[in-house]
Image (cartoon, helix red, strand yellow):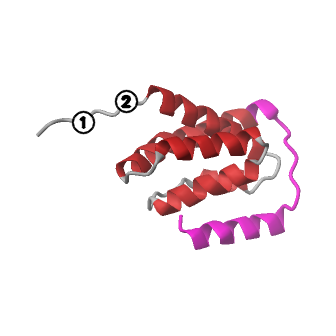
Amino acid sequence: MTTYEFIEYLLQAKKENPGTIIVDEAAAYERAQLVSGSFVFPLYGALWQLDFDMTAITEHLEYLYDSGNHFGLIYFIFMLADAADFTLPLLFSETSSNNALVPILSAAIIEDWLDYDATSEVVIEDE
């Protein structure tokens, strides 16, 4: 999904559903975990391969989450994906267009990101 498509989708979704309420909180958490799990690990890898400063990215994501800036975290993830020419799933756009789901998606993303950051190992092979 390009930047243009993402913005168009968000604007259209906001026009159709300006405020959304979570009916089933357990389902919302499960959806956010599925969405996050479908892209966080490959996005992390794509950024690492492009020599992005993963420590700085992780610290900034933690700062956004800890400060309660969930919309900022979602936007930053989108900017990272765009910078790495990484395609985010449509469910990311659908979930992030729902104001009530953004904090839940943000929590799922930071959990997956920190888990991957803590357990990933860089292996450099000599040729």
Residue 85 drawn above or below residue 55: below
Residue count near mark 1 (Cα–Cα under 10 Å), binned few <14, some 14–19, many ≥20: few
Location of residue 24 in the rendering, given as x and y in whole percent from the top left corner? 82, 35
**Which mark is drawn over residue 45?**
none
Nearest to the observer: residue 71 or residue 125: 125
Are the two marked residues, 1 and 2, in contact with CB atoms closer than 8 angstroms? no
**Which mark is drawn over residue 121?**
2
- At a point 62% along the width and 46% down the height, the residue shown is 60
Q: Main secondary structure of the magenta part?
A: helix
Location of residue 13 in the rendering, given as x and y in whole percent from the top left corner? 76, 64
Q: Secondary structure at mark 2?
A: loop
Magenta stretch, residue numbers: 1-27
- At a point 88% along the width and 46% down the height, the residue shown is 21
Left or right relative to 26: residue 94: left
Nearest to the observer: residue 24 or residue 82: 82
**Which mark is drawn over residue 124?**
1
- At a point 71% along the width and 65% down the height, the residue shown is 10
Q: Secondary structure at mark 1?
A: loop
Residue count near mark 2 (Cα–Cα under 10 Å), binned few <14, some 14–19, many ≥20: few
Number of residue marks:
2
Residue 109 among magenta residues: no
How far apart are the two marked residues, 1 and 2, measured between alpha carbons? Answer: 10 Å
